[in-house]
Amino acid sequence: MTGPSLLYRSSVPVTDDISVVIPKVGDVIDREDEYYTQVSILTAMPMDYMLQLDELGLDVSEVTDYELFLMLFDTMKDMKTDLIFGDLDISLFERSYHIETGAPVLYDEENDIVIDRVAYTKIASFLRQLHHLEKNNRKPANGEAKKFLLDRARKKAERNRRKKKESQIEPLIIAMVNTEQFKYGYEETRGLSIYQFNESVRQILHKVDYDNKMHGIYAGTIDPKHLSQDDLNWVRHK
């Protein structure tokens, strides 16, 4: 999602009635499971739910990301979604259809608010940008590939059921606080926005990589001719 810098923003508008929040690190870590579950739902692609779709008798190749979103939305209705949608009450939204086009939408009749395909795309795109999530557009090439991927998905699901769930953000906070390039302590980090923190992590990783390359050049183990201008500029940020 392009637009104004997110560095000092606390939310981003999607429509006149809907905004997506940029929460503080402290709020995220206090409600981590809930928050990242919602992010996962809102950014999910059909391949991410291949196994569940197959169990419903649906072909993953024929389900769009928007259709999947409409299927999954109800699972969020009993959750507190203020870290993503602020004071928007998503429990009021029901499946409906656009009056003019007949396209499926989510509609809050009480407040006359619509989430259509365009609004969903903006929400998902922004959350991917915020957390550097790649959009999984893969599709099985044929029936044999689909069978292989389904088998792999079942094995992965079984491993995940047995695996102890670990924090996504805590290890990053600990690593950053104990890195010389990061200038914040544990309590100060809680006050950063999740965007500020995630971008700092990426920038520090780039700076460490740059420093290692420079050490290699000085030691004669890396030929600078093989490096791009991006490699030689630690200030760049993507």
Image (cartoon, rainbow, N blue to C red):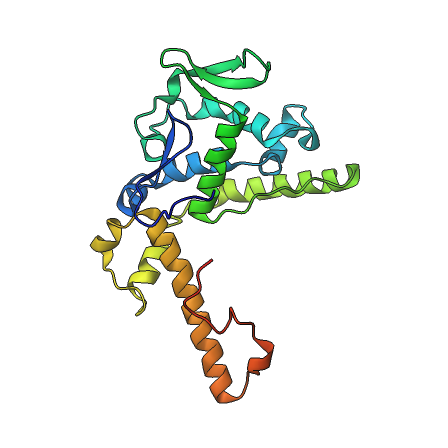
Q: Is residue 194 above or below residue 211?
A: above
Percent coordinates x, y for residue 61 in the rendering:
70, 33
Relative to 164, residue 84 above or below? above
| Quadrant position of residue 135 | top right
- Residue farthest toward the left in the current orientation of the protein: 187
Left or right placement of residue 235 versus residue 59 in this view: left
| Residue 164 appears in the figure | no
- The reply to whether residue 119 is visible in this rendering is yes
Residue 17: horizontal and vertical position, in percent?
37, 24
In the rendered image, residue 154, in percent from the top left (x then y), is placed at: 62, 39
Residue 14 to residue 195: above or below: above
Q: How many marks?
A: 0
> Which one is nearer the viewer's eye here, 112 or 166?
112
Residue 92 lies in quadrant:
top left
Residue at point 36%, 47% (across, down): 6
Task: Answer with left or right where residue 42 lies relative to residue 228.
Answer: left
The residue shown at (54%, 14%) is 98
Left or right: where 95 falls relative to 46: left
User: Is 146 placed left or right of 45 in the picture?
Assistant: right
Residue in view at x 53 percent, y 72 percent: 229
Residue 114 x, y percent position in the rendering:
45, 19
Q: Residue furthest front?
A: 4
Between 87 and 73, the one lying in front of the other is: 87
The foreground one among 106 and 28 is 106
